[in-house]
Image: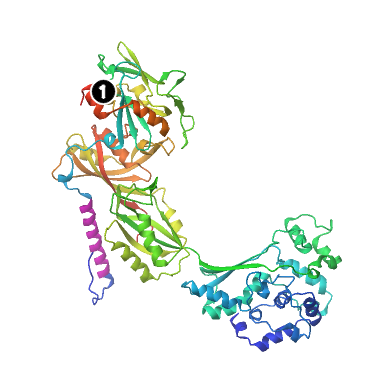
């Protein structure tokens, strides 16, 4: 491609001159545009960007009308836009949007009325010119679709205008063509035949297959060339960036901050949310349209998230800025320097879309560690401490807690408490810290107070007294992801 | 957070050392966050029931001294049980049996499933929930709240004594989910904990 791009006008002229003159003239007389003729003969590359004039090269008259094949798409003639310098128009739009990008790619969508089926065009060429010496000498190298021809026409000038290469990167320029007759099935014989062949229905000419139709009765199926094209397409263009992802771990220091924005009857629950604090900062830094926040599980609003933090992903939609490594660190610092210190971020980094799998991996099996502030209705004894710490992989039956029973299925679930440790608090005999490591999905508050006996055993039933939980903190989520 | 002198070139071993120091500091920070100041803790904290529910009472429900409690959770669910002043507790030996097989169906026989609470029976506030027996008498416990019966406390069948020792917790009778509008109507007929204490002269 690069070599071709360096070819001069002379070489383009030579390429075009090599096309069979009779066929070119005939196609021109049928109102086929220059770029469509190129694609019928399978030309490729930058020759499309500034095509030499066929009428002067072949001494023929080219009709100044809408191309019957591409309905103006390759002539840059549209119902709402008429601009010879389409690449400049697109490049200006892109530049106005202030995206940072180092490559771009084109996405083209064309209406079904356009005959873009390469096999169909090849059959047509074969039927029409199969007997010609140039065709038999294998000079015909297949046809190019409208989409590819359009890309050849635009990519080279756009690379110059945007000063970067085109490849399948995350920055996309989207060109959308629509046609008022896009859904009109009966208007075009060729389009009809084409469609029918695709869905495997018998063609209009009865039992004969499509290719035999072409071979035996070319005039019939080539009607599309005789029919004058009616209206040009409607053209819209825009650009966007595919989503990118930030991964990291968050800590939540407040008992009045929810993980996600939580509004009931127009009333906000909690003073802020982890989602808004982290996502909002990232979104602003990346100048995106919107973001989505995903985390590996969640904690209640009144539970702090401490220790190594909880893995999360922020998906940024249509970000204008590509964050560099340094920039990502800056976002992290910005969040961590916020005055209220509600939330902290660790190990923030850009991750691929595989961040999803990283986070979902082992999410269900993960172990979680908590610290609960517990009060019991009698003083804690040494034997209690020993009793609690001697229990390993304790099986607990939990009925769906009353506090969530209104929205969850009433079930009895078995969960495992892997280990427990008590930590006494100086100056109190009835309060202590309970450190415990449990299977994901264990309801800790209910394990402490027993939920009216609906969780069994519970700390209360184990110690044979009333147990109340005053505070709960998550101190570790044992997952590999985003630990560094 | 430790600050590293910018001019100082940190080699690998130093870096892992600073990492260790950081981890230790984080450990300390975590400890500080976790351990509460005893002075700020109440001598006796409010119980989970007190924190999570608003307590109401249905007094003399259909019969004198047939006092029941209704714990209303913020999510709308109601836990039904026997108030300390219920007449059954006055009988010698307390409650000896609980039978959910009252009315047209066994209240403990229906298995409610799914988020939508399929199979939940819809009951009026005066529908019978169970029959509790003492040595010489028996009493009918009623829903008090119109709504869907989500569960009954099956434990009571095997351990009716739970009612004598812990009627306000493990000895609850049932959980009912009323419609919001129905709840408002029911609520008007109930008395608050404060009024209850005044009316029944209990603490």
Q: Outermost residue toward the right? A: A216
For disc 1, the marked residue is B84
Q: Chain of mark 1?
A: B
- Work out whether residue A102 or residue A363 is closer to the camera in this orientation and state it: A102
| One can see residue A287 in this view | yes
| One can see residue A425 in this view | no
Q: Outermost residue toward the top? A: B136
Q: Position of residue A410 (x, y in %)?
A: 42, 35
Q: Position of residue B133 (x, y in %)?
A: 33, 15
Q: Secondary structure at mark 1?
A: loop
- Work out whether residue B80 or residue A144 is closer to the camera in this orientation and state it: B80
Left or right of A336 in this view: A350: right
At 31% from the left edge and 65% from the top edge, which residue is drawn?
A333
Q: Outermost residue toward the bottom? A: A10
Q: Position of residue A212 (x, y in %)?
A: 83, 63
Left or right of B36 in this view: A315: right
Could you say which quadrant of the image residue A128 lies in? bottom right
Q: Position of residue A441 (x, y in %)?
A: 38, 44
The chief SS type of the magenta part is helix
> What are the residue bounds of the magenta stretch?
B14-33
Left or right of A449 in this view: A363: right
At 71% from the left edge and 63% from the top edge, which residue is drawn?
A113
At 55% from the left edge and 81% from the top edge, which residue is drawn?
A160
Left or right of B119 in this view: B170: left
Q: Magenta segment: does it hold A249?
A: no
- Vertical order, A177 against A391 (above or below): below
- Work out whether residue A66 or residue B31 is closer to the camera in this orientation and state it: A66
- Vertical order, B87 against A467 (above or below): above
Image color mode: rainbow
- Work out whether residue B168 or residue A43 is closer to the camera in this orientation and state it: B168
At 34% from the left edge and 20% from the top edge, which residue is drawn?
B61
């Amino acid at each position: 491609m690069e070599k071709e791009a360096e070819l001069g006008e002379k070489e383009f002229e030579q390429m075009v001159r090599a096309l069979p003159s009779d066929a070119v003239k005939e196609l021109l007389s049928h109102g086929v545009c220059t770029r469509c003729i190129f694609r019928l003969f399978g030309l490729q590359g930058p020759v499309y960007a500034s095509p030499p004039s066929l009428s002067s090269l072949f001494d023929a008259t080219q009709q100044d009308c809408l191309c019957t094949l591409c309905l103006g798409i390759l002539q840059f003639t549209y119902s709402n836009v008429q601009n010879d310098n389409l690449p400049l128009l697109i490049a200006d739009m892109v530049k106005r949007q202030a995206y940072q990008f180092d490559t771009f790619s084109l996405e083209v969508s064309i209406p079904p009325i356009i005959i873009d089926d390469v096999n169909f065009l090849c059959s047509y060429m074969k039927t029409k010119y199969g007997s010609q010496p140039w065709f038999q000498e294998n000079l015909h190298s297949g046809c190019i679709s409208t989409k590819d021809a359009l890309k050849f026409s635009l990519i080279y000038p756009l690379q110059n205008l945007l000063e970067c290469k085109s490849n399948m990167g995350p920055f996309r320029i989207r060109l959308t063509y629509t046609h008022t007759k896009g859904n009109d099935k009966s208007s075009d014989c060729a389009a009809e035949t084409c469609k029918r062949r695709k869905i495997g229905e018998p063609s209009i000419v009865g039992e004969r297959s499509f290719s035999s139709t072409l071979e035996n009765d070319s005039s019939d199926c080539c009607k599309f060339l005789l029919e004058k094209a009616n209206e040009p397409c409607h053209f819209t263009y825009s650009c966007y960036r595919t989503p990118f992802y930030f991964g990291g771990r968050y800590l939540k220091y407040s008992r009045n901050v929810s993980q996600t924005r939580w509004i009931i009857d127009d009333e906000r629950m909690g003073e802020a949310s982890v989602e808004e604090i982290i996502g909002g900062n990232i979104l602003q830094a990346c100048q995106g349209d919107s973001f989505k926040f995903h985390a590996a599980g969640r904690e209640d609003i009144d539970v702090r998230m401490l220790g190594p933090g909880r893995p999360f992903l922020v998906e940024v939609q249509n970000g204008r800025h590509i964050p560099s490594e340094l920039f990502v660190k800056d976002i992290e610092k910005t969040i961590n320097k916020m005055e209220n210190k509600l939330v902290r971020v660790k190990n923030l980094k850009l991750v691929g879309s595989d961040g999803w799998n990283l986070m979902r991996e082992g999410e269900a099996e993960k172990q979680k560690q908590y610290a609960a502030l517990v009060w019991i209705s009698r003083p804690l004894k040494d034997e209690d401490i020993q009793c609690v710490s001697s229990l390993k992989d304790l099986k607990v039956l939990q009925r769906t807690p009353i506090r969530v029973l209104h929205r969850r299925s009433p079930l009895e679930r078995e969960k495992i408490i892997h280990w427990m440790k008590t930590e006494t608090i100086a100056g109190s005999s009835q309060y202590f810290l309970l450190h415990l490591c449990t299977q994901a999905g264990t309801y800790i508050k209910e394990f402490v107070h027993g939920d009216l006996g609906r969780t069994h055993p519970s700390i209360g039933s184990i110690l044979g007294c009333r147990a109340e939980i005053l505070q709960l903190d998550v101190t570790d989520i044992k997952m590999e992801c985003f630990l560094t | 957070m430790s600050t590293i002198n910018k001019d100082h070139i940190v080699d690998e071993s130093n870096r892992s050392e600073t990492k260790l120091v950081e981890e230790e500091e984080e450990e300390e920070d975590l400890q500080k966050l976790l351990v509460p100041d005893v002075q700020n803790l109440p001598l006796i904290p409010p119980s989970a029931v007190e924190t999570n529910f608003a307590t109401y009472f249905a007094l003399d429900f259909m019969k004198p001294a047939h006092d029941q409690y209704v714990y209303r959770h913020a999510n709308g669910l109601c836990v039904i049980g026997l108030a300390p002043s219920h007449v059954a507790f006055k009988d010698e030996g307390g409650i000896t049996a609980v039978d959910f097989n009252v009315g047209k169906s066994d209240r403990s026989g229906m298995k409610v499933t799914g988020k939508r609470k399929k199979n939940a029976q819809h009951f009026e506030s005066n529908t019978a929930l169970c029959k509790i027996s003492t040595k010489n008498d028996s009493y009918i416990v009623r829903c008090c709240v119109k709504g869907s019966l989500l569960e009954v406390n099956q434990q009571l069948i095997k351990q009716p004594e739970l009612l004598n020792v812990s009627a306000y917790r493990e000895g609850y009778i049932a959980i009912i989910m009323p419609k919001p509008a129905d709840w408002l109507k029911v609520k008007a007929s109930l008395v608050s904990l404060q009024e209850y204490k005044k009316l029944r002269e209990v603490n």
